[in-house]
Image: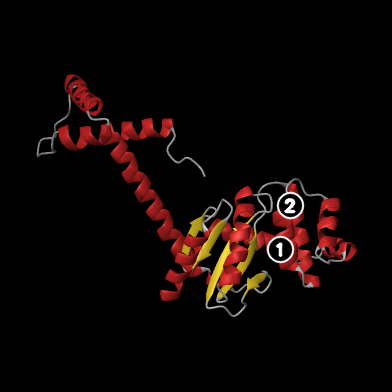
């Protein structure tokens, strides 16, 4: 996860707070005859605010936390609106593979990368979820962002759709540890019953690249830049969400 508030930003926010306090508490009010702060007054104001913040540093922490909460809520609200405006592309794109119950009452969308360790960590809980809850429809958005072999793996996975083995091959790719090349791809393909030669040929099909491009564009629209990211109901959730939390979000979506 990215650190939102590194030291330079904290200092910047502190400076903003200092300026805001100066203006709101100490600046003279405008009147019929405009007034201004003298250099001496400005120095005195800055010293008062400086001394206050030194004596009460928790004010800076509280301001940073409040700003962080506000930014997170603003992002969540924007993402919810983006989900509503892009429902068809998210939930009903005919080219996107689906696992679980195709007619399920709740749809879970996952943006993932086969190289992402957090995606690999959540793969087993997702399998368990589909086994335990037969009402879940899992939409799998290939979102390769971690290098060329991630792109290679996604092309191979989407090519497996033509042989009816996408989900099995998806699991094999998630379980693999290490780099992806064609030798690895073919070995994993053979293990799950795919024809490796046909898979390699199908990887060049024209519809695969536009689908991946559409997934990247959709992720940008939703302000999704990390994997895994889930969309459940109208909520966007980043990270390797624990199984129990996934179940909670699904129940919430069912009740909405």
Quick check: 156 left or right of 112?
right
Residue pictured at 53% horizontal, 68% vertical: 86
Q: Is residue 89 visible?
A: no
Q: Say whether disc 2 or disc 1 marks the residue closer to the N-terminus.
A: 2
Instruction: State the image coordinates of residue 75 (x, y, percent, origin top left).
Output: 43, 54
- Mark 2 lies on a secondary structure that is loop
Residue pictured at 48% horizontal, 69% vertical: 250
Residue 138's image quarter?
bottom right
Residue pictured at 76% horizontal, 46% vertical: 179
Residue 97's image quarter?
bottom right
Asked if disc 2 and disc 1 are in contact, CB closer than 8 Å, the reply is no
Mark identifier at residue 176: 2
Give the color scheme: rainbow, by chain, secondary structure or one colour.
Answer: secondary structure
- Report the quarter where the C terminus lies: bottom left
Give the residue furthest to the right: 197
Asked whether 200 or 105 is in front, the reply is 105
Position of 110 relative to 104 (above/below): above
Residue 89's image quarter?
bottom right
Q: Which residue is mark 1?
A: 210
User: Counting other residues with Cα less than 10 Å from the Cα at mark 1, is it few (<14), some (14-19), or many (20 or more)?
Assistant: few
Asked whether 138 or 27 is in front, the reply is 138
Asked whether 54 or 205 is in front, the reply is 54
Instruction: State the image coordinates of residue 200 (x, y, percent, origin top left).
Output: 86, 60
Position of 163 relative to 178 (above/below): below
Instruction: State the image coordinates of residue 73 (x, y, percent, origin top left).
Output: 38, 54
């Amino acid at each position: 996860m990215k650190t939102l508030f590194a030291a330079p930003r904290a200092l910047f926010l502190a400076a903003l707070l200092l300026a805001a306090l100066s203006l709101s508490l100490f600046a003279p009010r405008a009147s019929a005859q405009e007034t201004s702060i003298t250099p001496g007054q400005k120095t005195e104001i800055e010293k008062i605010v400086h001394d206050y913040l030194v004596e009460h540093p928790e004010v800076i922490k509280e301001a940073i936390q409040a700003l962080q909460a506000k930014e997170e809520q603003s992002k969540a609200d924007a993402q919810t609106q983006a989900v509503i405006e892009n429902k068809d592309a998210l939930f009903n794109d005919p080219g996107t593979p689906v696992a679980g119950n195709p007619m399920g009452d709740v749809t879970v969308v996952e943006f993932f990368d086969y190289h992402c360790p957090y995606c690999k960590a959540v793969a087993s809980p997702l399998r368990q979820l589909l086994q335990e809850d037969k009402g879940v429809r899992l939409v799998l958005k290939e979102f390769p962002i971690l290098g060329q072999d991630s792109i290679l793996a996604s092309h191979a996975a989407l090519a497996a759709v033509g042989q009816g083995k996408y989900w099995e091959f998806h699991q094999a790719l998630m379980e693999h540890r290490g780099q992806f090349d064609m030798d690895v791809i073919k070995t994993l393909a053979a293990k799950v019953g795919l024809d490796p030669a046909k898979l390699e040929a199908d990887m060049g099909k024209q519809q695969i690249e536009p689908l991946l491009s559409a997934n990247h564009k959709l992720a940008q629209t939703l302000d999704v830049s990390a994997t895994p990211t889930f969309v459940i109901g109208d909520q966007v959730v980043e990270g390797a969400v624990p199984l129990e939390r996934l179940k909670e979000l699904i129940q919430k979506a069912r009740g909405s």
